[in-house]
Image (cartoon, rainbow, N blue to C red):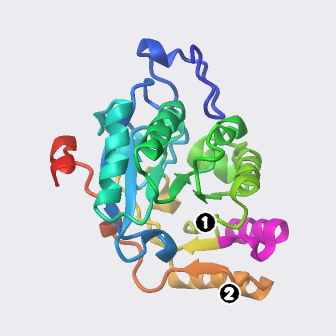
Amino acid sequence: MDYCNLCPRNCRVNRELGNKGVCGETDEIRVALASLHMWEEPPISGETGSGTVFFSGCPLHCVYCQNYSISSGEIGRAVTTDELCSIFLHLQEKGAKNINLVTATQFVPKIRGALIKAKQEGLTVPVVYNTSSYESVNTIKYLNGLVDIYLPDLKYKSSELAKKYSNAPDYFDVATKAIAEMYHQVGPDMIVRHLVLPGCTEDSKDVIRYLWDTYGDNITISIMSQYTPMPFCKVPELGRKLSKEEYDEVVDFAADLGITKAFVQEGEAAQESFIPDFQNWDLEEFLKS
């Protein structure tokens, strides 16, 4: 692809020449971590863990990103398509319930090749696509038949919040079209996540109402309370954890609508333990483990 249009930023950078797009990456696949991850929703983590592959870079760049060290491109190991295939197969050997692709947009063409090769070589566990939903519909179509479960966010309905926190005033329009394509591909095999942000309960209600009005109980909604203030975030109102009262207000709203297929988080969810250790991952050691 001479000029990149994989994501809605449509930056048209020639990443094949080593130039970096808005995502912060060239077209060389970079992996920040591959591991068995227990902190996803219960059907995704299961008892053995989700075989999670965190990719470097991100098209969205939210100001509060909990994985900033990898979304900013600071951390990551370059891998070939063959090495990525080996990672998938090794995760399966280690007992992974699935292969969970996290923030993979910027590498989708090569990931597609790695998935096809891995399936030819014995990959049988489901493939999960874990995304902010700031996706081109055409990129999602490129994954048709390879992804079994979609795990998209729906972060905002408000264009003002999307602009302020993610520099993406078109987020809701873009994300809802991408989610519609995901639903077209896999139907109810989808969990749509919404992270409730401090001071944003009314927008959270708007997001949940949209999902209910559009999909009813044909999808599962994950209402998340785990917002963790990060020291680099310079937006004052996001400098605190979500209060229990705010979260309960959103969950009660969902229940009053009639939503029954939902995951909620109880107790102290906003902990830095939810943020993986990206600093010490080594590909060679991982493949030997």
Q: Within 10 angstroms of label 1, few (less than 14), some, or many (20 or more) residues?
A: many
Q: Is residue 240 above or below residue 125?
A: below
Image quarter hosting the C terminus: bottom left
Residue denoted by label 1:
194
Q: Which amino acid does label 2 sit on?
A: Asp
Badge 1 amino acid = His
Q: Which residue is located at x 50 percent, y 25 percent? A: 21
| Point 51% across, 74% down: residue | 43
Rendered view: 228 above or below 281? below
Which stretch appears magenta?
A: 202-220
Q: Where is residue 57 in the image (x, y as percent from the top left)?
A: 43, 37
Magenta span includes 207: yes
| Viewer-closest of 264 and 159 | 264
In this rendering, does residue 275 appear at all?
A: yes
Q: How many labels does the image show?
A: 2
Q: Bin the neighbour count of mark 2 within 10 Å (Cα to Cα): few under 14, some 14-19, many 20 and up.
A: few
* Image point (36%, 43%), residue name: 70
State the residue lying farthest toward the right.
213
Q: Earlier in the sequence, mark 1 or mark 2?
A: 1
Q: Name the residue under label 2.
A: 252
Q: Closest to the observer: 130 or 156? A: 130
Question: Going by the image, does 66 lie left or right of 134?
Answer: left
